[in-house]
Image (cartoon, rainbow, N blue to C red):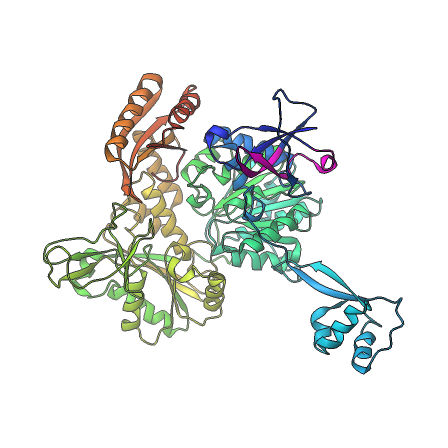
Amino acid sequence: MVVGVLVELANKSVDRIFDYNVDDSIKDDIKVGIRVEVPFGRQTLEGFVLEIKNSSEVKDLKSVIRIIDKDIILNKELIDLGKKIKANTLSTLISCYQAMLPRALKAKKKTNITKKYDIYYKLNDSNDYKFNKTQQEIINMFKNKPLIKRDELLKISSSSLKTLINKNILIEEKKEHYRLEYGTKTDNIKKLTTLQQRVIEEVNLNSSNTYLLHGVTGSGKTEVYIKLISNILKNSKTAIILVPEISLTPQMINRFREVFGSNIAAIHSALSEGEKYDEWRRINRGEAKIVIGARSAVFAPLTNLGIIIIDEEHSDSYKQDTNPKYNAKDVAIIRGKTNNCPVVMGSATPSLESFARAQKKVYKLLSMNERINGKKLPEIKLIDMNNEVKKSNSHISLPLLDAINKTLDNNNQVILLLNRRGYSSFVTCKNCGYAFKCPNCDITLTYHKTSNTLRCHYCGYGTKVYKECPECHEASVNNLGVGTEKIEEELHKLIPYAKVLRMDFDTTSRKGMHEKMITAFKNHEYDILLGTQIVAKGLDFENVTLVGVINADTSLNIPDFRSSENTFSLLAQVSGRSGRSNKNGSVIIQTFNKDHYAINYTKTHDYIGFYNYEMQIRKKLKYPPYFYICYLKISSKNYDIASVEANKIKKSLERNLKNTIILGPSPANIFKMNNIYRYGIILKYKKEDNLYNLLNMLYEHYRTNNKITIDIDFNPSHF
């Protein structure tokens, strides 16, 4: 027997299947999709068995060293899916398979994540040993219980227990236990509105249709998802539900746990590697029928898949930034077609690409334009900060401060959004203008007051803050810009009695902090929730009646063709956190650009108006959804090499692509990152038959060049 093995090296030069002999001693356990250990040159590597055959054209084959798992890790669907992702993203095949798996199951040497076991004991009846009083007490416990956990027996006496084990009177049994527990279900399915019921009836569960559910914030999309999944479970099928943020996962899991109990499994980055390993095996064994998680949960090894739901489908977190650069929405649609099951994508602010496809009937459009409680969407008030800056010494305007105080006086809660963490966005010298920059990246350092450090949010570089300027040696260092830390400090000064909870990357990096913070705020242990964009999406707090946006222009000033769309989406989403129960809600947005169309369409909750306006701009500028985009990033540690090779690539593209607009090369938004210089080339095209072949040849040409790296990203979420 011969097997074809794909080894763990994510290098294009070895991105192919290698043949190995299989010894008779292990051939019965060989299956396509398992992991094996094989010799590779002078190394010993892990890999996946992708082929089984009788012979090979290669002579003097080496043999498989051992089988790592007897269980199949990659089923046929996932193997085929990996090949499609490789073709669509020009990534290596091994990187596609590695992206599907938790760390414990990747083909990766020296990864050792163990299973957890509970130790139980049972009585060996064939023993006539004479017991003392304590030993007899232990023995008596087995009269009504054939199997008892070790901890219970240790409470009586560890020495007596040890004696009974040594005399073979008690026999040890190990039982694996999973690290996560979901408790029992309560079947708490809420009564649906007529609008929700109509949407459910429109979804054909026996089709591979893609549906776009455009539902305003608070319209009850989650309950629609629950009912759809409940319906497919009745037909013995399974479901995947994707959420974009870790912060959303606890609320979604808690709601689904109420209805489905331990029938759910979670896959997201906040879990430990052991927890991910357990959850994956529960899914693979068929013990969980519903998988909830972030992007990578789209690869859950479910069989008989009945539906895939993508919540907050507009989020750019569904696109992976590292190889393979897949989009979970595209992968979901592929799996939907393979399993003949529907894909339902929901959002209050759908991406322009998705809504355009719905308009063209590629997706089926479903609408829920009313809140579940029948209340109107919150009133939105714009504050022109050009005027307010003169009136207040704070970044919180007087109207917003007044509204916060009134809200807290009424025993309600407030959410404040500022999409920038840290204390100040940069530090400079008032005397000479020197700005503190990262030595590795072409970007200013962010000041974090709690740790009194300057940090780079790209490479992680950090340094202490010095009062003296390193350039002119004057004690004139000044903090400019504003981050969540600074706003927290201002709130404590302005409203000393208010309990403020700051939620950003710095405060939620410890395990379990998302869930703790959300629960604490939900229980009204805090008055104000201040955070970055993680507070904007999907969270549901019944006592929040005021949402304040400290600076609506943060995302508007990013040099990206999607900046207006991202701004509108973020503002509309965070506005939707206000007035979700029976209480009326309001929103105050502070801006220096009150006449910008993205901000004005937010004020009137007018997604369709924004969509139509933005589509005109996209059409004129030849951007998605009218054109596809491909971004080439050319990187090198050497400035001159990066520049020369980027221009060579541009000329090659111009010679060979006849139907493509080529922009660049130009320095990337962050030109230097981690001491690597980066140039970008943007390709805009509608149909270019030669594109994939040309880019693949380009990849191959630079594959062995260790001085230059070519990175290719189709339909990037940002440049």
Choose between 578 and 264: the one closer to the eye.
Answer: 264
Which residue occupies the extreme bottom position in the image?
Answer: 133
In the rendered image, the quadrant that contains the C terminus is top left
Instruction: State yes or no: residue 45 in magenta.
Output: yes
Can you say whether 57 is above or below 175 in the image? above
Choose between 194 and 388: the one closer to the eye.
Answer: 388
Place of residue 617 in the rendered image (x, y in percent of width and height, measured from the top left): 31, 34
In the rendered image, the quadrant that contains the N terminus is top right
Q: Is residue 590 left or right of residue 527?
A: left
Instruction: State yes or no: residue 147 in magenta.
Output: no
Choose between 682 and 200: the one closer to the eye.
Answer: 682
Total residue callouts: 0
Q: Quadrant of residue 22?
A: top right
Place of residue 190 in the rendered image (x, y in percent of width and height, measured from the top left): 61, 58
Place of residue 141 in the rendered image (x, y in percent of width and height, measured from the top left): 80, 74
- Residue 711 in view in this figure: yes
Q: Residue at x 54, y 44 (%)?
A: 109
Residue range in magenta is: 23-49
Q: Is residue 470 left or right of residue 152?
A: left
Can you say whether 142 is above or below 503 in the image? below
Q: Residue at x 23, y 51 (%)?
A: 437
Place of residue 183 in the rendered image (x, y in percent of width and height, measured from the top left): 65, 62
Q: Quadrant of residue 474?
A: bottom left
Q: Quadrant of residue 645?
A: top left
Q: Residue at x 16, y 61 (%)?
A: 477
- Residue 190 in view in this figure: no
Choose between 484 and 412: the one closer to the eye.
Answer: 484
Q: Is residue 383 left or right of residue 53?
A: left
